[in-house]
Amino acid sequence: MATGSAKNGGAGQKKTSQNRTDARTLKRKRVKDDLEVLQAATDALDPKNPDIKKFTDLPLCEPTSAGLRDSHFEVLTDVQRAAIPLALKGNDILGAAKTGSGKTLAFLIPVLEKLYCAQWTEYDGLGALIISPTRELAVQIFEVLRKIGRKHQFSAGLVIGGKSLKEEAERLGRMNILVCTPGRMLQHLDQTAGFDVDNLQVLVLDEADRIMDMGFQSAVDALVEHLPKTRQTMLFSATQSKRVSDLARLSLKDPEYVSVHEAATSSTPTNLQQHYLVTPLTEKLDTLWGFLRANLKSKIIVFLSSGKQVRFVFESFKRMQPGIPLLHLHGRQKQMARMEITSRFTQAKFACLFATDVVARGVDFPAVDWVIQADCPEDADTYIHRVGRTARYESKGRAVLFLDPNEEKAFLERLDHRKVPIERINVKENKKKSITNELQNLCFQSPDLKYLGQKAFISYTRSIYLQRDKAVFKFKKLDLDAYAASLGLPGTPNVKFQKGEDIKRLKNASRAAISSGDESESDGEGGKRKTKPEVRTKYDKMAERQNQDVLSSHYRKIIEEADSGDDDEQDFLSVKRVLNDSALDETAGADAITAAAAMPKTIMLGNQELIIDSKRREKLLTSKKKLSKYMDKGTKLVFDDDGNAHPIYELQNEDDFKQQGPAEALRREFVQTGAGKVREADIEDKQLAQDRRREKRDRAKARERGEEAAQTGTQLEGGDADAEAALDFLRSLPVAGQDGSDGGRSDDEDGPPKKKAKKWFQDDSEDEAKALQKAKTKRSGKKVFEMDYEPDNLEDLEALAAGLLED
Ligand SMILES: Nc1ncnc2c1ncn2[C@@H]1O[C@H](COP(=O)(O)OP(=O)(O)OP(=O)(O)O)[C@@H](O)[C@H]1O
C-alpha cells in the first residue's frame, strides 16, 4: 500500500511539477506580452497630449497602477503631467515646479516603470539611486516609494547614516533602489567591498540645485565617477538651476527642461498668503513671542538661521510656557531624535517647530498653518523653499517674514526679482510686549541658558558678518549691545570673525567635519571622506571650540596656560619680585633675580615662614581674607581721657584693691546692687508689656466699632479718638468700583462682570494671579476686594485683613 501509494504518489508529483512549470511558462509569456504592449503604448505616447489627466491615462504597469490606486492618487498634477510621459520615454529630465506641486511622484513613477520594464531582479544589483540633500527628505521619499511601490517585487533601502557603516553595507548588495544622502552614499562607494553600481539605470537628484550647490559638489562629483555613463538622469527642484556646468558634470544627455510654472506670475503657490513685518533685531523675540501667544491653535514652523539660535529660542520659550507645544529640529541632533521630532510634528494638530534650514526643502509636513522666518533667509531661493512648507498641494497656508529695517529694502528687491508676491503687515502697537525682563531672569537663574544665549548671539552675528549678500546683511548696522540685551544676556559676548569666507562654505565645512568625525551626527552632507578620528582630550576639544570667548574664565585660563610653555617660570619670577619688592636691592639687578629663581619662594607672615610651592598657594597669599588665618589676632585696646591705651580687661593694682576693704564684703555688695537693678528693670518691663497689650486691645475694639459704623452708615456717637482714626483710615481706602476702575472686582461679585478684551500678550503671571485669587475666594467662600493700597506697617496690614475679608 505504502509502495503502491508511493508509486501513485510519484506519478502525482511528476504531474504537479509539470503543471507548475507550465504555469510558470504561461505566466512568463503573459508578462512578456504585457511588457510588449506596455512598451508599444509608451513608444506611441505623445508626451504633449493634453488628454493625459489621470494616472490611468498613462501606460503604467499593473503593480504601479495598483500602488497609486491604493494610495488614492488619481489625478496628475501639472509637473507630473509634464514630466512623467517624457521620463517614461527615457529622456533625461530637468524638472522645476513650485513647492508642494508633487515632484516626488514625478520621478518615483518613472523609476519603478524603468526597472519593471527591465524585469529587474535582486541579482541585477542596484538599478536606481535617488539622492536627497537631507535625511528628513530622504526618509520622506522612501516612505512615498514604499507606498506606491508596494505591489512591486523590488527591494529598496535608505542610506542616510545613523547606523554603523557595516550594518548598512550588509544590506546594500541586495538593494534595487536606494534613497540616500550624498556623503553617506559616497562613503559606501569608497569603502564597501562588493557594492556594485555598474548596472545603474536611473539617477535622481531631488532638490538638485541644493545638491549641486557648493557644499555637496565634491561629494556628487566623486559619486558620479562611480556610476555608469549610460543611465537616465533626472533633476528636480522648486528652484532649478540650468547651469551648463552642472549638467555637464552629471553627463545629462539632451535633457528635457520641464518648468510648468515658468510663465506663472509668482514662483510660490497661489494658495499661499505671504507677509512681511519690519521688526528691529532687538525686538525680534518680543514679536515672535507675541505671535505665538496669539496663535496657540495653529501648526507653525519658525525658521532660524542656526542650530544655536534654534536651541536658545526653544529652551527659553519653553521655560516661559507659551501655551502651545514646542519642538525643535536642527542638524546636530542625533538621527533618532530628528526622526522622533519629525514624526511628532507630523502628527501634531497644534505645535510650533523651531528649525534650521534642515527642513526648509522638500519636507512635506501635513497641514502647516504658518511658516515664520524669524531670521532673514540667505537668499530668495531659500525663502521660497521655506515658505513652501505650507500651502502644499491644494491646501492653504500663510507665511510671515521678519525683517530688520536694514534688511528690508534690499531683500524685498530680491523677492520681487524672483516673482514673490509679499505684503507688509504691522504688529498692533497695543499688542507689543517686551520679554527682555523674562529672558534676563531666565539667563540669571540658569547659566546653561545664558551660555546658549551667548552661543546664539555669536552664531547670529557671525552669520550676518559672513553672508554673501552685503546689501541685505549689514553687519556694521547691528547694535550688538542692544541685541545681546534683548536676548537677556548680562553683557555682550566677544565674537571672532574670519574674513574672506562665506556662510555657506562655513556651514558646509562644519558638516563635512561632522561627517568625517562622528557618523551618527552626520547629515549625510558634505561628502568628505572619513578619516579615523584621533583621541582628543577634554582640553583639546575646548581649545578647538571656535567660540572660546564664551568659555568660563576658568577654562580660558587653562587654555591660555597651555599656550605658553614658559608661563610657570615667568610667574615664579614675577611673584618673587612682588614679594620682595621692598627687600630687593635694586643694585643686585638680574643676578639677584636669577639666584632667587633657583630657590623656593617664601614669605614671612608674623613669625611664620610660608613656602610658595604652587600656584594655588600663591593665589592664596594674594587674598587678604585667606591670609588672615595665618596672622596673629590683634588685641583690642581702649583709650582713657588722657589718650593712653589700655587693654579692655585691665587688672587693678593689688594694693589699691586691698585699700577698698575685705574682698568678700566687696563681692556681696556687688551682688546685692546688681540684683536690685535687675528687679527694677523687670518691673518696668512687665509694666511696658501690659501697656502694649491694652493699647492693642483698645485699637482692635475701636476698629470693630468703626467697621460697624461704616457698614450701617450710622454716625459714631461719642468721641473715641482711636475709633475715629480707624474709621477715617477705612474710609480713606478706595472701595471696589468707586474710583471708576473695576477696582479689582472679582469674578464672583454680583452684577455682570466686565468682559476683558482678549489680549495678544497675556502672560502667565497674570493667569497665575487670577487662579490664586479664584482659589482663595473659593476656599474662604468670602468676597475678595482688591485694593490698590500697600500697607506700610503691621497695624495697617491687620486693619486691611480685618476690614476687607467679611461676609
Ligand atoms: N497627483 C496627486 N494627487 C494628490 N496629491 C498629490 C499628488 N501628487 C502629490 N500629491 C501630494 O502633494 C504633496 C506635495 O507633494 P511633494 O512632496 O511631492 O511636493 P514637491 O513638489 O516635491 O514639494 P517641494 O518642492 O517642497 O519638495 C504631498 O502631500 C503629496 O502626497
Image (spheres, rainbow, N blue to C red):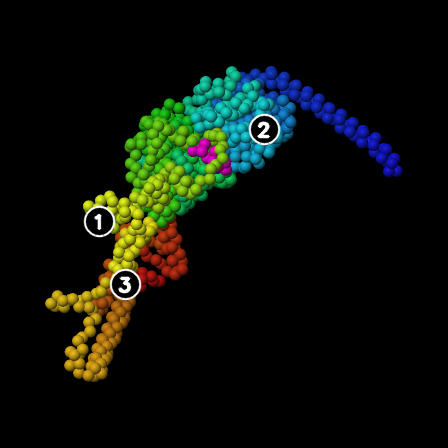
Question: Which quarter of the picture shows residue 129?
Answer: top right
Task: Kindly identify which residue carries mark 2.
Answer: 195
Task: Kindly identify which residue carries mark 3.
Answer: 794
**Magenta part of the protein: which range?**
510-523
Disc marking residue 584: 1
For discs 2 and 3, the disc positioned in front in the rendered view:
2
Q: Secondary structure at mark 1?
A: loop
Query: Do residues under tags 2 and 1 come within 8 Å of each other at their CB atoms?
Result: no
What's the distance in space between the residues labelled 2 and 1, CA to CA? Answer: 78 Å
Query: What residue do we see at 24% from left, 61% from top?
Result: 729
Instruction: Name the residue type under label 3.
Output: Leu
What's the distance in space between the residues labelled 1 and 3, CA to CA? Answer: 65 Å
Q: Which residue is nearer to you in this view: 641 or 165?
A: 641
Asked if residue 93 lies left or right of residue 648, the reply is right
Vertical placement of residue 582 versus 131, above or below: below
Q: Quadrant of the N terminus?
A: top right
| Residue 734: % across, % down | 27, 56
| Residue 115: % across, % down | 61, 24
Closer to the chain start, of discs 2 and 3, is 2
| Residue 526: % across, % down | 46, 30
Query: What residue do we see at 79% from left, 30% from top?
Result: 16
Closer to the chain start, of discs 1 and 3, is 1
